[in-house]
Amino acid sequence: MPLLVEPALPPGTLRDAAQPRLAADGLVLRSWRRGDAAAVRTAFGCADIQRWHVRRLDTLDEATEWVGQWADGWDAETAASWAVADADDQPLAQVGLRGISLAEGSASVSYWVTPAARGRSVATRSVNALSDWAFHVIGFNRLNVSHSIANAASCRVAERSGYRLEGTLRQAIKHTDGWHDWHIHGRLQTDN
Ligand SMILES: CC(C)(COP(=O)(O)OP(=O)(O)OC[C@H]1O[C@@H](n2cnc3c(N)ncnc32)[C@H](O)[C@@H]1OP(=O)(O)O)[C@@H](O)C(=O)NCCC(=O)NCCS
């Protein structure tokens, strides 16, 4: 059955090029490497990262698998993740896109920051750099940030990065302590 609209972004928009390295106001967003697995395992030792991302990484093998999945996501054009690195090239944080729909030109933004790096706008700088690339280099139309209404820090990151609060979905996500209502924030290419 023919579609009546063209896809917002054609297939191959991501996979036809290498995942880019992005500058983020003193930080670098780069692809994950196998050698980052130990840092990722340590990051997932943080109770807040476990809580809000609803997973643990118990072994180096699991962390290696986590690091390795993103090359497949890029090739499938369904998900992407960047390590946010400091001047020593050590990962301080993660920022990425989940649920990528090229047809709709949309995706959801994901982020976490290791405890020692928090409070220095690492998340905000990273989300802004990723958003600028996604909107102005790739041509996404809309990006979302969704978080439990109990996650006040994530809400601030979304607001500070230009993602307007658009509404609350009731009991939209299951955390270890039960169902949580979800804030939906959105930023459009034309918001900038
Ligand atoms: C949320 C998170 C990514 C923020 O990282 P960060 O680099 O410290 O964020 P920034 O420095 O860019 O901004 C943090 C903002 O949140 C505010 N904040 C931090 N902790 C807060 C809290 N407990 N309650 C309310 N606001 C809080 C800060 O004051 C700051 O806002 P301000 O500049 O207006 O004062 C980090 O705390 C984290 O990784 N948390 C665990 C994982 C997570 O929640 N991921 C998001 C899932 S949706």
Image (tube, helix red, strand yellow):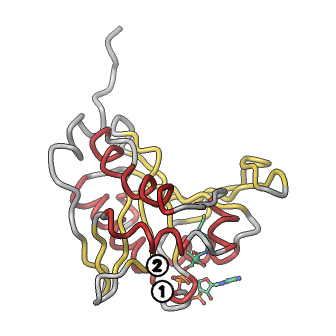
Q: Which mark is residue 124?
A: 2
Quick check: is the Cβ at mark 2 less than 8 Å away from ligand 1? yes
Mark 1 and 2 residues: CB-CB less than 8 Å, in contact? yes
The answer to which image quadrant residue 67 occupies is: bottom left
Q: Give the x, y percent position of residue 13.
A: 21, 43
The answer to which image quadrant residue 137 occupies is: bottom left
Quick check: is the Cβ at mark 1 less than 8 Å away from ligand 1? yes
SS class of the residue under badge 2? helix
Q: Which residue appears at 36% of the width and 53% of the height? A: 68
Visible residue check, residue 117: yes
134 relative to 112 in the view: left or right: left
Q: Quadrant of ligand 1?
A: bottom right
Q: Amino acid at mark 1?
A: Ser
Q: Give the x, y percent position of residue 37.
A: 42, 66
Question: Which quadrant does the N terminus fall into?
Answer: top left
User: Between marks 1 and 2, how big is the CA–CA gap?
Assistant: 5 Å
**Is residue 129 shown above or below 182?**
below
Local crowd size for mark 2, using a 10 Å CA cut-off: few (<14), some (14–19), many (≥20): many
Q: Give the x, y percent position of residue 63.
A: 48, 60
Q: Give the x, y percent position of residue 97.
A: 42, 55
Q: In the rendered image, which residue does mark 1 sit on?
A: 121
Q: Which mark is residue 2?
A: none
Q: Which residue appears at 51% of the width and 66% of the height? A: 163
Q: Amino acid at mark 2?
A: Thr
**Is residue 116 shown above or below 145?**
below
Question: Which quadrant does the C terminus fall into?
Answer: bottom left
